[in-house]
Amino acid sequence: MDEFQEILQDFLVESFELIEQLDQDLVELEHNPQDLELLNRIFRVAHTIKGASSFLNFDVLTHLTHHMEDVLNKARHGELIIDADIMDVILESIDLMKALLNIIRDTSSDSGIDVSACVSRLDECTGGGAKDAKEEPLIEEEPEEDEADYENMDPDELEAEIERLLQQRQAEDKAKREAKSANESEKETPQPEASVSKTPVAVTPTPKPASVEEDSDSSDNVKAAAPTKKVSAVEQTIRVDVKRLDHLMNLIGELVLAKNRLIKINDDVEERYEGEGFLEELNQVVSIVSLVTTDLQIAVMKTRMLPIGKVFNKFPRMIRDLSRELNKKIEIEIFGEDTELDKSIVEEVGDPLVHIIRNSCDHGVETPEVRLEHGKSETGKIKLKAYNEGNQIVIQIDDNGKGLDVDMLKKKSLEKGIITQKEAENMSDKDAFTLIFKPGFSMAANVTNVSGRGVGMDVVKTNIEKLNGIIDIDSELGVGTSIKLKIPLTLAIIQALLVGVQEEHYAIPLASVLETVRISTDEVYTVEGRSVMRLREDVLSLVHIGDIFEVERVLDTSEYAYVVVLGLGTSKLGLIVDTLVGQEEIVIKSLGEFLKGIEGIAGATIRGDGGVTLIVDVIAIMDMAKRVKASAIDSTSDAAMLTHEKTEASDYTVMIVDDSKTDRTIMRKALEPLGVTLVEAGDGQEALSILKQGDYSFDAILVDIEMPRMDGYTLATEIKKYNRYKNLPLIAVTSRTGKSDRMRGVESGMVEYITKPYSADYLSSVVQRNINFRSEFLK
Amino acid sequence: MSEKLKQIISKQNKVEEDINHSEDIVQLVGFIIGDEEYAVPILAIQEIIKPFPWTRVPQVPKYVVGVFNMRGAVIPLIDLRLKFGLSPKKHNEDTRFIVMRHGDDVAGFVIDRLTMAIRIKKSRIGPAPETANGDNTLIDGVGKQEDRIITILKVNKLLERDF
């Protein structure tokens, strides 16, 4: 059983590879029907599959390929000219073959698909009817020799041979009937034939190594037949389970995180031990580790790369089918099919490309008559190009059809209620082009098989954006349309811009960041309740990241803010953030089942300090920005400033910040008679964390200037950053008496300056004044 | 002396045997939220850790306080006080994160205080009290011990997303 499974696996992998090649060859064959080389190659594929499937007892498949082989063999011997109609039948049979192989892969048997209709059409091609009985032998295992044999046979032998063939034929017919009845009994299940013959069956990629051409023996045949290319240079390849590669990729991700962490620690150490000898050594090690990690990451990424030709291969066939269906003449040219992409991305770009190309065929390229009228060549041309550009791969689809009519686009969108009259008027041509990606939009007057449901291009957009890709569309009326898909090379590790808002950090994929600008708050205007700013010639709409992510505004916003200009295709958005932290390589981690699908969040990453940072979903943000109300930069929430009614002396709370226990005690003694609540802190850091905890609401803070870890000036500056503590009286209590010290105190936000030594009464009175202590509480 | 020791050892062995021989025993870990004691099966607990920094996640219910990094995995953190409708409370030195796992689902839960590991006979566990929630209840059963009642929670329900 296991052995059988093993053989079956090999058979399937080989067959799918062969068929992929077959589609292309057949389309080529239609243009050069006399190309014997090509015919031979195609014949051999059918033959190989037939041979293997009969060995594995897949009768239906054998039956089908047998008849295919029959037609091809005739063509090979010049008895049959392959025209478009015959090609249709052949292609149909190949689709059936693919469907059968898919079924075999899923169920290990080839029942469930009726091939008899197709087989009889194939028979018609060969001249139809019973006279085939004599020609059947042509397609036996060694067809060439059989033909010669008949001449030399004596009548008896011939009789016996005919007898044998008749029996074989009967057996086949029986099989055919069985297949038919089997199909009829399964009428309830969706009609396989109908669906198979209409939609081009996508060859589901089975796990394959990066280069597949070199390792199957059938392509050895191809090589022998076409001795023009590839002399020796046989590449050595290994088939590897994709799971193992995924695992490897995960491990690399962990390594990148560890590397980031190492770099951060290195920076910290550098700061603390500046100028010490071991630093240089540490630096070297860190840079080697980071270099090797990057190389390793690239190397592993490369092992997961597949040539995009895998996807491109099916398009010549599709174009051929479409042009016949639509009665148009369309040619496809493919460039850069060797361009490599991560496996997971290759699997995702197939569908969008199908939609774009269908669209080009249906709406782009005109009918031959119209083309001639406009002085174009009768045959429309679609160019499919793939190339690398920086860290991205670009797939470009050009057609020389009629182009996009901006006015028509706007009119249609208005009709369907996708845009408003006002929007239509203000829309640039570029923006208008992107209308075709809106859900529900369709240019087709009526729904056809090919397009017109207004779904396809929307799918393109969502799929490409899911890959963090960008769509760029350009068109000239009467000349053609060009669509560019820009896709990142890999999904797992990306470059990101880290931004800060209040006390939180977020990572924005760098691919979507066009630029960053620093603005002052008065550069922000409000138009119809939305914040906008002027960016060179354009008006850029703005949204505060804090409004999108419901960030609590505890820190006071400074005079300046940073705007991260996000670009997605042709739409732009300015995201206001408080700080720019920097650029970093991040590993995307999922938030897991529990938190998946949170709007605006694409995932999370772990930073060098071990903390988690959320990754912004730029597409979602652009959407959310339309809904978020502009609270702009200058809105301050004063809710926290509510002062509670004081009913007794202990409702007043004062914090004493001093590193000396003695000084704290002196202050405590001075203030205790008032009956106010006193909290002590040993230094600025401690004071700040007590404040942040929010257990107390303070009415005043007494601050010593000279303190370890964080001095009084820094503490005052930090405290003043918080909105709710803006008006909190800070009283400096210090032995520093210089004028400059006093000045610094005022600058950092101190309201009073008490110099040591002081009398207890004086301190008490200053505090009373500052906290508005009500005299009736005095005992 | 050694006689005494032997006696003690044999006594201990006996106790252990008793437990082993008696009917099914369930091992639970008990903890306090608010004023009540709850418990979850010990096998559902991946680890119990002291609180450490987490990252807030927007657009989720209040009781999902955020996500944290546990050795490279990003794990959601849920405050059971808020989930059970109690008022929020500052974390103190008794506060713990209990990381629970059910299948592939993992999450950390903030609890007020751990109590103890509990061994309880299956027969001592009663069904969940009739509640309006019916199937949706978080309560698996109620364990009765001499001096107290422990609410046993369903880990799979705790880890289920309900927003």
Image (cartoon, grey):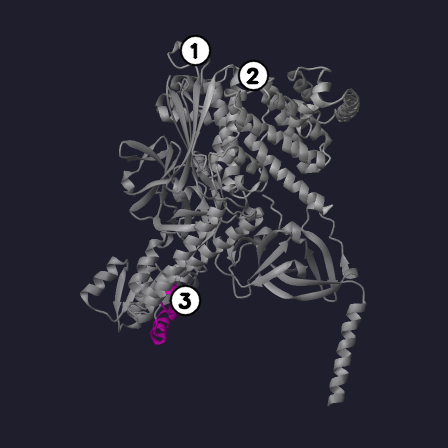
Instruction: Please indicate whether residue B38 sits to the left or right of residue A738 in the image.
Output: right
Q: Amino acid at mark 1?
A: Val
- Residue A22, percent from left and from top: 56, 29
Asked which secondary structure carries label 3, the reply is strand
- Residue A745 lies in the magenta-colored region: no
Which is more foreground, mark 3 or mark 1? Answer: 1
Q: Residues within 10 Å of mark 2 (few under 14, many from 20)?
A: few
Which is more foreground, mark 2 or mark 3? Answer: 2
Asked which secondary structure carries label 2, the reply is loop
Say which residue label 2 marks: A83
- Does B6 sit above or below residue A619? below
Q: Name the foreground residue: B148 vs A32.
A: A32
* C-alpha span from label 2 to label 1: 25 Å
Say which residue label 1 marks: A370
Q: Quadrant of residue A693?
A: bottom left
Residue A424 disc label: none
Q: Name the foreground residue: A759 vs B32.
A: B32
Q: Give me the residue at 68% from left, 46% from top.
A: B136
* C-alpha span from label 3 to label 1: 87 Å
Q: Quadrant of the C terminus of chain B?
A: top right
Q: What secondary structure is the stretch in magenta mostly built from? A: helix
Say which residue label 3 marks: A679
- Does A380 sit above or below residue A282? above
Residue B40 visible to an observer of this rendering: yes
Judging from the image, mark 1 belongs to the subunit labelled: A
Q: Amino acid at mark 3?
A: Val
